[in-house]
Image (cartoon, rainbow, N blue to C red):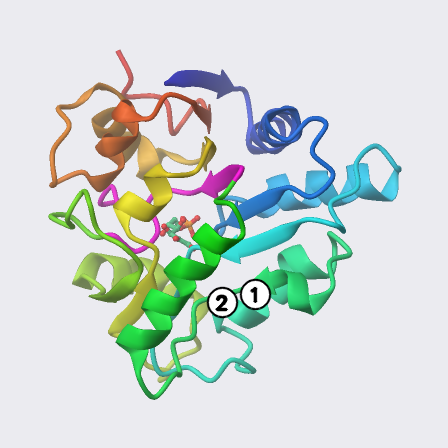
């Protein structure tokens, strides 16, 4: 695991963009794994700038999102389908058919989750997976004590995650209780992983992931077993590293 500590969030985005691009160098049809949330916003904006400048072309690639809320219609502005459309699909100039998000509105969620996991494998697997980390150490929505070998499936969101994500929802709008998320086993199959984290509220989770024991209480700690992980953090998120 290589950890880079940057002076600020903008630099986190720039360094992470370098890592994403170097991970797929020479690959005209890269398979990207994409996270939602606040953490990758600067990274996506930086990649979009480089696409605009003609430095990189991701339009022939594929993108697979990490997760989706259960019970939110895909066209809802806070669905991850819609978030990925705004932050990845359009800025990366990808045809909608090249971008997949788990279906949290499927009548048979378990079957849809299995089909999603198989679709990633059929695409040849993820070349570079972009990750954020939850304050409780989750990646994707693999909450503490998730199985290290888990595949894409339905999970219950913890109270902490629902409180953390309440900021995206307007007053009175309930934060979903469940999600469909790629499993830890699915994520670990990505050939390279770029994790971004900013802010002091991430410092405990980052320290546990990088320096703590590999343990289910911090799902992200499984990344210690992955051969190619770049962790890019700002000084606040890296403040508890030894
Ligand atoms: C999002 C995801 C989550 C987030 C994490 C951090 O698709 O899978 O693991 O990366 O909850 O969220 P932010 O970046 O909003 O702090």
Residue drawn at x 24%, y 74% is 177
Q: Which residue reaches farthest bottom?
A: 107
Instruction: Specify whether residue 36 is painted magenta.
Output: no
Q: Position of residue 13 (x, y in %)?
A: 60, 33
Crowding at dot 2, Cα within 10 Å, few <14 / some 14-19 / many 20+, comes out as many
Q: Is residue 128 left or right of residue 214?
A: right
Residue that badge 2 annotates: 80
Q: Quadrant of residue 2?
A: top left
Q: Is residue 65 left or right of residue 118?
A: right
Q: Position of residue 130 (x, y in %)?
A: 49, 41
Foreground residue among 28 and 133: 28
- Could you tell me how far apart the alpha carbons at marks 1 and 2 are, in whole angstroms? 5 Å
Residue 37 in sight here: no
**Which contiguous range is marked in magenta?**
127-142
Give the position of the C terminus as an image quadrant.
Answer: top left
Secondary structure at badge 2 equals helix
Question: Which mark, residue 98?
Answer: none
Q: Position of residue 69 (x, y in %)?
A: 37, 71
Q: Position of residue 37 (x, y in %)?
A: 47, 54
Q: What secondary structure do most residues of the magenta stretch adopt?
A: loop
Residue that badge 1 annotates: 83
Residue drawn at x 38%, y 29% is 237
Residue drawn at x 46%, y 32% is 191
Q: In this picture, is 158 found above or below 51?
A: below
């Amino acid at each position: 695991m290589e950890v880079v500590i940057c002076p600020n969030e903008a630099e986190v985005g720039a360094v992470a963009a370098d890592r994403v691009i170097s991970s797929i160098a020479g690959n005209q049809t890269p398979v990207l794994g994409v996270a939602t949330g606040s953490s990758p916003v600067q990274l996506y904006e930086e990649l979009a700038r480089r696409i605009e400048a003609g430095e990189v072309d991701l339009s022939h690639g594929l993108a697979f999102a990490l997760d989706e809320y259960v019970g939110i219609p895909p066209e809802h502005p806070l669905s991850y389908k819609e978030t990925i459309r705004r932050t990845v699909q359009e800025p990366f100039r990808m045809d909608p058919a090249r971008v997949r998000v788990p279906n949290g509105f499927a009548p048979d969620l378990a079957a849809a989750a299995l089909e999603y996991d198989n679709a990633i494998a059929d695409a040849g697997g993820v070349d570079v997976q972009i990750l954020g980390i939850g304050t409780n150490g989750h990646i994707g929505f693999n909450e503490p004590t998730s199985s290290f070998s888990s595949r894409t499936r339905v999970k219950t969101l913890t109270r902490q995650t629902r409180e953390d994500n309440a900021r995206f929802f307007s007053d009175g709008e309930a934060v979903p209780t469940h999600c469909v998320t790629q499993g830890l086993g699915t994520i670990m199959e990505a050939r390279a992983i770029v994790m971004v984290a900013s802010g002091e509220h991430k410092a405990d989770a980052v320290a546990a992931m990088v320096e703590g024991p590999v343990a289910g209480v911090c799902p992200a700690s499984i990344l210690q077993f992955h051969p190619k992980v770049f962790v890019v953090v700002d000084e606040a998120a890296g403040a508890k590293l030894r």
